[in-house]
Image: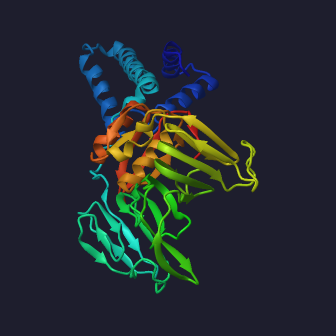
């Protein structure tokens, strides 16, 4: 019921005792709607107190009555009180319909930003919690060191170039948790920056014909195209030889393979996301899909879709579709400059990015808002400062125990998780 005059007329009929059963039911149904939990009263007690104060105020203002007029005037004043109450409730009802989205959000418990955090897992299963005061690690001929030269471990032993007395080539993994980031310089001089919730699997030494790593999550690569020494594996043993300058650098991630020659690029390939994105900054890369069902590009002889990228292009792999778009490189690699770039991203994409960096579990009530963001923020800000962007959207939010970000969608427009 949305007509205020109609509501007031029904109240008069109701208080006079002349309302029909249907009219009584309509009024009672409407009254139930303004008792809903989302009505803008802080509590039922506050609502009752407000009603009592209005009634008492009206009663105190009535004139002295002669006995024969008392019953009629008392009825009149209480009818007036009821009308005023219902008018107030009606105004609040319409206010709720138009202004509920501007209710202040609950206070957010303070959550700090992510930082340098990572775990190094060696081939034998040994795990090393890396120092958060350091920015990264470096693999050299005999040691794994922090970037400042501090030694971590020395699991690798090599003889001089040309010697065939060598240990096996093994694979280590560098993993950043949610709320972490880290850098690694591989033994060929290639630099890799890992974003939060990501893993890079790499060999202790690259074999002679190709350099191959495996990525889950997001990383930025600066590939060294002039490595001087490489390892050749023979009979499960490796030995050092001069490396060719044209040896490809290969990054394998979810459903795709990237072949690189002297290039800076960003790969975003999270296991829980349907889309894999490869953004080229400089040089050139070849993106090859491992999904044989792809039909969107002419396949090579192996039946796999391939596309060459130019700088400022992005390959997007989604299901059975591989497309290439021109993009703003600064926006796509903003995390490397300690920034969030939200413009053009969906609500879920933005919240997922925040959840990875601030180590949050996200819970949506009433579905995920169908919104597109505009704006940016710095990654070194506390969560409360970054979440101010949500004030422009029709949501309420708060942080619950266990680093849970609870988001209440106040619109009827939503998407499936």
Specify the quadrant of the image occupied by residue 71: top left
Total labels: the figure holds 0
Q: Write the residue at 47% across / 72% down.
A: 241
Specify the quadrant of the image occupied by residue 106: top left
Specify the quadrant of the image occupied by residue 413: top right
User: Which of 302/77 is in front?
Assistant: 302
Residue 257 seen by the camera: yes
Q: Is residue 407 left or right of residue 183?
A: right
Q: Is residue 48 left or right of residue 19?
A: left
Q: Is residue 371 above or below residue 111?
A: above
Q: Is residue 269 left or right of residue 58?
A: right
Q: Is residue 397 above or below residue 101?
A: below
Quarter that holds the N terminus: top right
User: Which of 189/368 is in front?
Assistant: 189
Give how far across and how far down residue 36 sits, in percent: 47, 37
Q: Is residue 207 above or below residue 409?
A: below
User: Which of 17/192 is in front?
Assistant: 192
Give how far across and how far down residue 217 sits, in percent: 49, 56
Q: Write the residue at 42% across / 37% down.
A: 331
Q: Is residue 377 above or below residue 82?
A: below
Residue 41 seen by the camera: no
Give how far across and how far down residue 355 sits, in percent: 41, 51
Give how far across and how far down residue 294 sits, in percent: 73, 48
Q: Write the residue at 43% across / 59% down.
A: 197
């Amino acid at each position: 019921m949305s007509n205020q005059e109609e509501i007031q007329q029904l109240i008069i009929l109701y208080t006079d005792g002349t309302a029909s059963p249907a009219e009584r039911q309509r009024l009672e149904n409407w009254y139930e709607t303004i008792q809903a939990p989302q009505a803008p009263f802080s509590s039922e007690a506050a609502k009752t107190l407000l009603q009592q104060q209005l009634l008492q105020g009206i009663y105190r203002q009535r004139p002295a009555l002669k006995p024969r007029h008392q019953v009629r005037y008392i009825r009149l004043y209480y009818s007036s009180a009821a009308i005023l109450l219902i008018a107030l409730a009606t105004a609040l009802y319409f206010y709720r319909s138009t202004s509920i989205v501007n209710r202040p959000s609950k206070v957010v418990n303070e959550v700090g930003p992510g930082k340098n955090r990572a775990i190094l897992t060696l081939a034998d299963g040994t795990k090393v919690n890396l120092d958060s005061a350091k920015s990264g690690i470096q693999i050299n001929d005999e040691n794994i060191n922090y970037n400042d030269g501090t030694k971590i471990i020395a699991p690798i032993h090599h003889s001089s170039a040309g010697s065939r007395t060598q240990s096996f080539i093994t694979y280590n993994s560098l993993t950043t948790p949610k709320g972490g980031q880290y850098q690694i310089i591989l033994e060929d001089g290639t630099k890799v920056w890992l974003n939060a919730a990501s893993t890079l699997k790499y060999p202790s030494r690259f074999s002679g014909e190709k350099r191959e790593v495996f990525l889950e999550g997001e990383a930025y690569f600066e590939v060294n195209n002039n490595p001087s020494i490489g390892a050749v594996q023979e009979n499960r043993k490796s030995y050092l030889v001069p490396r060719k300058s044209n040896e490809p650098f290969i990054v394998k991630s979810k459903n795709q393979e990237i072949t690189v020659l002297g290039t800076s690029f960003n790969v975003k390939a999270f296991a829980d996301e349907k889309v894999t994105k490869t953004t080229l900054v400089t040089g050139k890369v070849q993106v090859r899909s491992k999904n044989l069902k792809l039909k969107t590009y002419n396949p090579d002889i192996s039946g796999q879709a391939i596309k060459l990228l130019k700088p400022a292009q992005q390959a997007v792999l989604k299901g059975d579709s591989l497309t290439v778009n021109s993009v703003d490189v600064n926006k796509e690699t903003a995390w490397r400059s300690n920034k969030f770039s939200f413009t053009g991203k969906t609500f879920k994409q933005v919240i997922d990015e925040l959840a990875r960096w601030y180590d949050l579990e996200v819970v949506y009530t009433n579905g995920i808002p169908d919104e597109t963001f505009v704006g940016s923020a710095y990654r070194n800000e506390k969560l409360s400062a970054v979440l101010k962007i949500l004030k422009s959207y029709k949501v309420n939010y708060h942080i619950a125990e266990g680093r849970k970000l609870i988001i209440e969608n106040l619109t009827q427009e939503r998407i499936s998780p």
